[in-house]
Image (tube, rainbow, N blue to C red):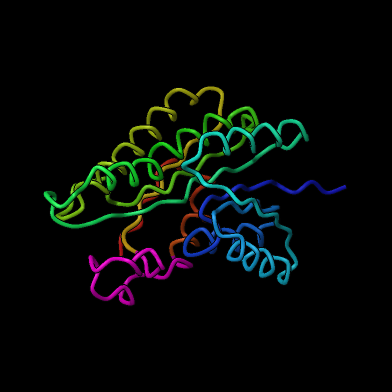
Amino acid sequence: MVFLKNCFITGGGSGLGKELALLYSQKGCHVLLAGRRADKLEAVKKAIEAGGGTAAIYELDVRNAAEIEQLAASFQANGQTLDLLINNAGIGIFGPFPTITPDDIEAVFSVNVCAPIMLTKAFLPLLGSRSSVVNIISTAGLRGKKHEALYCASKFALRGLTESLQKEYQESGPRFVAAYMGGMNTPFWEQSKHVKDPSVLPSPKQVAEQIVQEAEEKLEIIIER
């Protein structure tokens, strides 16, 4: 019997999450797709299956701690283990600092910071010593940027989480990988005028290919194009 590696990806219905799912399925992983839009997740699942892979979908609001805990508990009850957790889901709200609202702060930090913390903590019992957690951080976690104060603050927080867990688990695993990439041509920009022409940015497939290629060997991946 062949046992497939289990790869859990948040925000797996579009953009970088979708491309990572397709690539990891091609590497022989059973991909667990999580997100709020079942229709998008189902489309990715069908694409994976059309390519000969296997996948499952989970409707999940990563802002909801109870949903995360419930899913983790069901995995444990069923003996499900994870070889790879990819915290990919993220949102960005951009603009001059004075325009930031309390709702903006809550929205960005709940998805970009609190969700990876909650998911990692809840899924830790499912991750073996040879498992990996890949946090999709962005170059906004490396340096501040104009009109991105809130987004950068959230990504710096995610960087801090990742680097701290690298040190905490360096002797026992799992591995914690930080992926820092610049902008991509994804639906991320559909509700924003912050980037005038997303078509000039790298495709999510290009970024996903580098992450998949380097994640097994490196703890830090920097993609600047």
Left or right: residue 62 compared with residue 157? right
The residue shown at (35%, 55%) is 181
Q: Quadrant of residue 117?
A: top left
Residue closer to the observer: 37 or 216: 37
Based on the picture, tell me whether residue 195 belongs to the magenta stretch.
Answer: yes
**Lateral position of residue 39 relative to residue 120, left or right:** right
Magenta stretch: helix, strand or loop mostly: loop
> At which x and y percent is residue 182?
31, 59
Per the rendered image, the range of residues in magenta is 184-206
Return the x and y of residue 14 as percentages of the image width and height: 51, 64
Quadrant of residue 56 within the rendered picture: bottom right
Residue drawn at x 24%, y 42% is 102
Q: Is residue 147 above or below residue 15?
A: above
Q: Nearer the viewer, residue 69 or 81?
A: 69
Which residue is at a point 46% across and 39% down the rendered structure image?
Answer: 116
Q: Nearer the viewer, residue 123 or 36?
A: 36
**Percent of width and height locating residue 122:** 57, 30
Point out the image quarter for the C terminus.
bottom left
Q: Is residue 159 above or below residue 28?
A: above
Image location (x, y in percent) of residue 139: 29, 51
Left or right: where 109 falls relative to 68:
left
